Amino acid sequence: MKKAEYFSKDFEWDELRVEVENDPSLSYHLVPFEPSLSVAEEEEAESQPWNDFHHRHASGKFFKERRYLLQEFPELVGCEENSKVLEVGCGNGSTVLPILRGNEKVTVYACDCSTEALERVKETIYASNIVSIEHRFHTFCCDFSTSGFPSWLACNPCQANFEQTSDGRGKNESYLTDSSSLKESRCCIGGVDFVTLIFTLSALSLQRMPKSINECFSVMKPGGLLLFRDYGLYDMSMLRFEMDKKVGFREYMRSDGTRSYFFSLGTVKDLFLGAGFIELELEYCCVKSVNRRNGKSMRRVWVHGKFQKPI
Ligand SMILES: C[S@@+](CC[C@H](N)C(=O)[O-])C[C@H]1O[C@@H](n2cnc3c(N)ncnc32)[C@H](O)[C@@H]1O
């Protein structure tokens, strides 16, 4: 992919917004909608469809490496040696692969709620001949929106130690006396430097997002970065959903049962700042691409965000 394709603004998001909001045939996308499922029903409904999805795409043909990722998030290359990255909802490894390839000094912890996905990501990564991969790549199964992350990522005392009190001392310094505990302690890996949330948050219902983002925050080291990319409001794929696929306001369910939420910048800001993050970058990426088969122009909208856990 050409660099320019991802950095350029092919169109103004506001022009698209005006067009969509004045088109009567699209008005059903704009009206409020009360979700009909309870939280418990949603928990049941959300992970199984993803497992089925990865089972159906087991051949690997579906795999597409996100080659633009390191251009969008150069910190993943320029970071300190031995930095730790947690890729949440790793799927078949589209995000994991460029990170491991682009930086031989990072360790990637990749999780997904689907065991099928974890099989696929291992196949992808082990087939790629990356240097010393057995020490730098770890997978685990986890639904971060319901059970949270395992304590070996950042145990409770280390999490408490991240939260410095106003005099600069960690709350739990009597328990964790050694400052190296923030680096690599025996109780856990000491938290992560980066969390990548790439097209994963949109798979959750809006009501489960605040808790899920808090989970990410809690396993990050102070100063760590959360790198976010996901579907933006009025993306072509949103406008293609028919009325009966709507399961909430700006939330849709595909025919295979997986969900997709479409983010405005305001919603992303509220979610991440609400969890305690500092906003570093937040914008729409508006890219026009042409469908080779029918020559039709497609307007894609993604949200790019970079958030920091306060030091
Ligand atoms: C669209 S894929 C994105 C995969 C990957 N991040 C990438 O860059 O291609 C969304 C992934 O999130 C996973 N997922 C959905 N809900 C999840 C949850 N609650 N906890 C963990 N993973 C989840 C799905 O199984 C799927 O693999």
Image: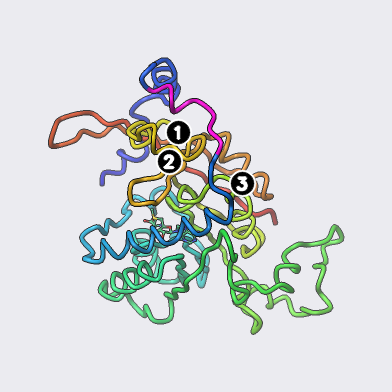
Locate residue 11 relative to residue 232 in the image: left or right: left
Mark 2 Cα-neighbour bin, 10 Å: few <14, some 14–19, many ≥20: many
- Classify residue 289 by image quadrant: top left
Camera-nearest residue between 184 and 139 = 139
- Tell whether position 17 is magenta: no
Mark 3 Cα-neighbour bin, 10 Å: few <14, some 14–19, many ≥20: many
Q: Residue 14 in the image: state x and y as whole percent.
A: 45, 22
Q: Give the mark toward the camera: 3 or 2.
A: 2
List the residue tagged with mark 1: 233
Q: Secondary structure at mark 2?
A: strand
**Is label 1 in contact with label 3 (beta carbons under 8 Å)?**
no
Q: Earlier in the sequence, mark 2 or mark 1?
A: 1
Q: Residue 302 in the image: state x and y as whole percent.
A: 41, 39
Q: Which residues are magenta?
A: 26-34
Q: Is residue 58 above or below residue 307?
A: below
Q: For the residue marked with disc 1, what is the amino acid?
A: Leu
List the residue tagged with mark 3: 272
Q: Residue 228 in the image: state x and y as whole percent.
A: 49, 49
Looking at the image, the residue that sits furthest to the bottom is 186
Q: Earlier in the sequence, mark 1 or mark 3?
A: 1
Q: Earlier in the sequence, mark 3 or mark 2?
A: 2
Q: Residue at the location (70% across, 68% down)? A: 159
Camera-nearest residue between 293 and 204 = 204
Q: Residue 232 in the image: state x and y as whole percent.
A: 44, 37
List the residue tagged with mark 2: 252
Looking at the image, the residue that sits furthest to the left is 293
Q: For the residue marked with disc 3, what is the amino acid?
A: Phe
